Each structure stands twice: as structure tokens, then as C-alpha cells.
Amino acid sequence: MYFLAVVSIVATTCILVFSFYNLFEIQVKNELKSKAVFFERSLNFLKDKTPYLNALGLYDIGIRLSILDVDKNIIFDTYTDKEREDIKSYIDNPAINSAIRDGEGEYKHFSKTFHGEIYYYALELQDGTIICLSQNTDGIYSVFINILPIIVLIAIFIFVLCNFLAVRFIKERARAEKMRREFSANVSHELKTPLTVIFGYADMMNNGMVKEKDIKDSVEKIKNESSRIINLIEDIIRLSEWDEEVASGETEKFNLQEIAEEVIDTLKLLAEEKKVNVKLINVGTGNNKINANKRMIYEVIFNLVENAIKYNKMNGNVEVKLLYEKGKHIIEVSDNGIGIPKKYHDRVFERFYRVDKSRSKKTGGTGLGLSIVKHIVQYHKGNMKLESEEGIGTRIVIKL
């Protein structure tokens, strides 16, 4: 990760330096050419050019302007420090020679005198005289120094970003590994308990240690524990399926009320067995169409209604309410059952967590139902709220 950061910084530095340098070079060339064309148009109509140029006051504009006659003698020059310059080298530079030969020319070279690069652009006027403009610029090293603060800021940003991503990756990996170990341990524990019971009763029956009158009870216990294993495996398979559904991202438009009615009809026998009354109330504006994963939403309503029935009182009530407010579909499932103590509210959505293990064992609960619900709601970018009080009931509200 840090190696990539260093490579990124070096690459960014090189790209920035050469980009800035090339842009600056193009800008200088264009500026010299445009000024040269301006002076060409002005001076072509003048026989004596010196008074006009002196009147313009060109000595402090940052650009050198020279006029050479047909014999390459300098007749006007804004550069005054002649002692620092090799005049012969100046008048023989390729830009001037090209202008004499082809009408225009340009040239660039590094000057040890000025410790930078000099750009030249020359044009031939109608009377044969040559106008030459030149400008001193910083070299690539100077450009690098000028943009060094930007490079340092980018380097710091890249380093901080890489460090943040590395720490986050390590934490996410550790968290995923911890969850995997906990999941494996929980599955092993949940399977071991019923399998131990099944093996124990089967071994006792095989060795003739169970009385004739107790065989039926022993078989019933084996059956119940087998049912627990089947339910657990089915829930684990569903969790795996939801992960695949998330990867595929399949959604469709469907009627939310029809799904709720289908769930209630499926759980009708369970409700009758528990003597619980289940009622569907649609208080929305008739907007029951939702764009979501149909199988997942069915699973959400099924799990919530099933829990509300299983953990209810005799002759209890379950209410499934559908609403549509401010562009959100709201699914509300409430009951007047046993409720959940407040200290467990934050944990009931954890995988394999059960408030009352003995009651869950009787009802066949695996502790994965609400975990599945939370997983699906998060996938749909929804939110969920739990309200529950021990001995009074539970209300779960989901907004999608």
C-alpha cells in the first residue's frame, strides 16, 4: 500500500511538472507571436521605426524587442545591459536566421547568464528589417520549485488516504474474520445441542434403556430436535441466498398488500394453533406498489409476523399495518405478546441471539429471523425501529 503511495507521488510529481512546464512554454510562445504580429503590422508602415518604438516605452514590459537591418545590425533594442551579452551570438541565433531565410523563425535555449531558458521569435518586415522578440523564463527546475508546495500537499493527501484505506481494510478484514469465526462457532453450537439430544435418546432406545411407555416421548423429542436442525439449516441457506440476491441486485415492482395477505394466509394455521388473531390494516393512500426485491420483502413480513405469533399470549393480537408517507412505504407489525426487555433491544437483531432460549427452543426459533430482516432492510437502504416492553408487546416499524 505504501509502495503504491510512493509510486503515485513520484508519478504525480512528474506529470505535474511536465504539464505545468509545457503549458507555460506554449503560453510564452503564443504571447511572443501575438506581440510580434502586432509590431509587424505597426512597423510595416514606418520608414523610421525608432521614434515610434521609443515613444511606446517598451523597456519595462518584460520582453526584449530588437530591430535589425538587412545587414543584421541592431538599430533598436530594449535590452540595455550589453556588457553581459555576446552580441554576435544574439544576432546569429536560429530564430533571426530563419526569419531572414523563411520570413519567420523561433528558437529556445538555456542561458547560463540568466540561469533560465530564453524563447525567441523573429519576423521579417516588408522593408527587409527583422523584428525579434525574446523572453526569459524559468527552467524546468524552477517550475518544479514553484509547484513544490502543491506536490507536497498532494503527497500528504495521498499518504493520509492510503493510510486511511489500509487501516480500514485491515479493520474490515479483521471484523469479517471475527464474524466468520463467530458464525462458525454459533452454527457448531446450535447444531451440537440438538444432535447431542438426538444421539442420546437414540442410543438409549437402541440399548433398551427406554421403557415402552416412554418410547413415544423419546421419539417426539428426537423429532423436535430434528426440526430445530432443519429450521437452522433453512435459515442459514436463506442468509446465503440473500447474499446472492444482493449481488444480483434484482428488483421488481409489486403490490405490497398482496404480499402481506399472502404471508398472513401462509401463517394462518400457526395463528390458529396459538389462538392468535392476525389483522391486516392498509391506511395508505392506495399507493401499494413498491420497487424492491419481492422475495426479500416477503421474508421480512413473514419473519416479523411469525415472531409476533410465536411470542404472543393465548388469544393475543397481531396487527400488520401498511402506510405510505412522504414517498416511503411503511410496514408496521405490532403485537400484545410477551415483549422484549429494554436491555436486549440492541441485541435482538444479532445472529443467533435469543432473549429467552428456553422459549425459543419450544417455538423452534433459531435466532436468525430478525438478523435476516435487518440484513434485507439495510440492502434496500431502509431503516427499522423497535419498540417493545416486557409483558405489554412489541412494535417494529420498517421504512423503505
Image: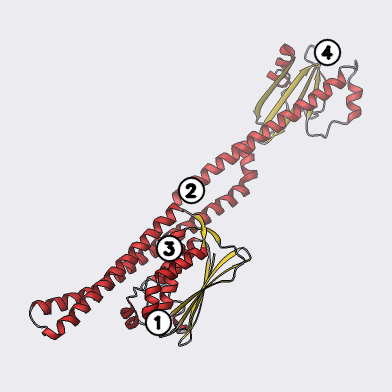
Q: Earlier in the sequence, mark 1 or mark 3?
A: 3
Residue 124 drawn at (x, y percent): 78, 15
In this view, the residue farthest toward the bottom is 391
Judging by the rendered image, the residue that carries numbered circle 1 is: 275
Q: Residue at x 56, y 63 (%)?
A: 288
Judging by the rendered image, the residue that carries numbered circle 3 is: 171
Q: Earlier in the sequence, mark 2 or mark 1?
A: 2
Taking the image as drawn, is residue 93 in sight? no
Give the Cα separation between the discs numbered 2 and 4: 57 Å
Give the Cα separation between the discs numbered 2 and 1: 69 Å
Amino acid on which the number 1 mark rests in the picture: Lys
Judging by the rendered image, the residue that carries numbered circle 2 is: 6
Asked which secondary structure carries label 2, the reply is: helix
Q: Residue at x 9, y 83 (%)?
A: 209
Judging by the rendered image, the residue that carries numbered circle 4 is: 126
Residue 2 drawn at (x, y percent): 45, 52
Residue 277 drawn at (x, y percent): 45, 79
Asked which secondary structure carries label 1, the reply is: loop
Q: Earlier in the sequence, mark 2 or mark 4?
A: 2
Q: State which quadrant residue 195 falls in.
A: bottom left
Amino acid on which the number 3 mark rests in the picture: Lys
Asked which secondary structure carries label 4, the reply is: loop
Amino acid on which the number 2 mark rests in the picture: Val
Taking the image as drawn, is residue 216 in sight? yes
Q: Nearer the viewer, mark 1 or mark 3?
A: 1
Q: Nearer the viewer, mark 2 or mark 3?
A: 3
Q: Count neighbours of disc 4 (C-alpha within 10 A) and say few if under 14, some if 14 to 19, many if 20 or more.
A: few
